[in-house]
Amino acid sequence: MARQDHPLKQEPGIKIVIIGAGSLVFSSRLTADLLSYPLLRRTHFALVDTDAERLEFAGQIVTQICQHGGYDEATYSLHTDRKEALSGAQFVISSILVGGFDAITAEIDIPKRYGVCQAIGDTLTPGGIMRCLRTLPEQSSIAKDIMEMCPNAFLLNYTNPMAMLCAGMFRAAPGIQLVGLCHSVQGTTEEWANRLNVAIQEVDYKCAGINHQAWITAFSHGQTDLLPEIRRLAESPELWRQDTSRMEYIKHFGYPVTEASGHNSEYSPWFRKRPETVERYCPGGGWNGEPGFIKTLYNRPDWRQTMAKMAAWETPIDLKRSAEYGSQIVHAVVSGQEETIYGNVMNAGLIDNLPTDACVEVACRIDHQGLKPQPFGALPEHLAAINRNQINVQALAVMASEETSPELVFQAMAMDPLTAAVLTLDEIRALTAELIDAHRAYLPPAWQEQRLATKPKLYL
């Protein structure tokens, strides 16, 4: 399906494909951000989704953004055929969910029965591993389609598990211009600037690591090093209770980490071992680590009414540009006006003490020549060690997807810090088998005949 719904006043300046355009928030937010730049107001948006009803709403919302923003030179088309949309594109933006709420429910509830208590489960842990298995094949297919239909296009990936998917896509489509984008670096640095009563524009900082676990190794205002004050604030009871596991990291390891405490609490063996430790380190619930919080985020039976209100402008889209990196990247490439963002790319020596073939999050300069990741050097060794615990799981999960191997899925689960802190190897094997069985409907056909081998239990 392809249709021109917004009047075409003249030939569009650039073509941007948004895959997963039927999302509740992301697609409309990104569209408004992009059109806020005068240079991008002749953009043609090719909106892609597998759900025709959501796609129709997405088109209506773009129409409202254009009308209320005065963007009468922008155009859009609707597509369920991805290849048709990709033809002639300069930029492709991917934010998809494979399997929907039912898959998320299975990957949260089944581990919980075994004692593995996840909050979000979209990056590491059993949830992140299973999400990789069902999402990476589709993301790799997108990358291959780009190399066929628009090989010079930039792919901006917003889909999780970020590091696993980007690593897999780089391998599936060599030469692709890909960067994985998140909001955790800009969100965390601005959060600390606000806590310290300084403007983020006046702060110099350095940050590097992996997605959802990058480390702020320098944070200064003028000649003042603010890390000592951050370390002091991390031990204040009020802030500790609001952002618990992140403050524990600062207290014990000395440096702020990106991403909220709910995510952070899942990536280590220290916080979610037992119900009492979840209660201790995730007080208040919500983004601070509420068990199964992702189900609250994704359980949206009211999505139709929500999108209808957006499409009728009863719930207006904020036309002020957000801090998301996507629009900044597009504008920098088109205009040549350099921007610095934090993106997920293959390491290849950018961070000296992380594996070369790991996907890392580092500062990247963007201009008309494209993306230029900036070498960071070495992280403090104990921080690199924490990152490597995640990278081990990521590498095994990507291999499991590529090789359709239940045994590699088990190995990824066994290396996961949270799962290993709670379960024995026999229990992890049983959990893995049950998760694979529960996800067969969302996995590629090659998985249908695959079964995880059983092993004898030799203890009394």
Image (cartoon, helix red, strand yellow):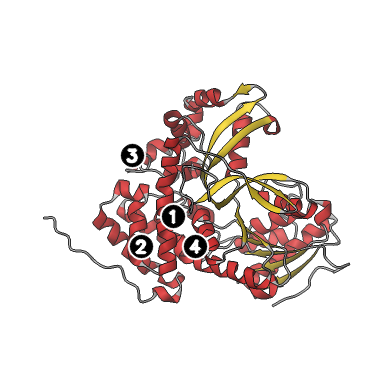
Q: Could you tell me if the residues under marks 2 and 1 are in contact, i.e. CB atoms within 8 Å?
A: no
- In the rendered view, does 407 fall on the left or right side of 140? left
Circles 4 and 2: CB atoms closer than 8 Å:
no
Which amino acid lies under the numbered mark 2 shown in the image of this protein? Leu
Residue identifier under label 2: 408
Give the mark nearer the N terminus: 3 vs 2.
3
- Residue 102 location, x and y as percent? 46, 64
Residue 220's image quarter?
top right
**Nearer the viewer's eye, disc 4 or disc 2?**
2
Secondary element under disc 4, as helix, strand or loop, is helix
Q: Position of residue 301 (x, y in %)?
A: 55, 61
> What residue is drawn where x is 35% and y is 76%?
449
- Work out which quarter of the rendered image holds the N terminus and state it: bottom right
Whether tag 3 and tag 2 are in contact, CB under 8 A, the answer is no
Q: CA distance from mark 4 to mark 3?
A: 28 Å
Are the residues tagged 4 and 3 within 8 Å (C-beta)?
A: no
Q: Which residue is mark 4?
A: 101
Q: Between disc 1 and disc 3, whose residue precedes?
A: 3
Residue nearer the viewer, 333 or 357? 357
Among the two numbered marks 2 and 1 on one chain, the one whose residue lies closer to the N terminus: 1
Q: Is residue 299 visible?
A: no
Amino acid bearing label 4: Phe
- In three-dimensional space, the C-alpha distance between marks 1 and 3, rounded to whole angstroms, equals 28 Å
Q: Secondary structure at mark 2?
A: helix
- Real-space CA distance between mark 2 and mark 1, rounded to the nearest whole angstrom: 11 Å
Q: Of marks 4 and 2, which one's residue comes earlier in the chain?
A: 4
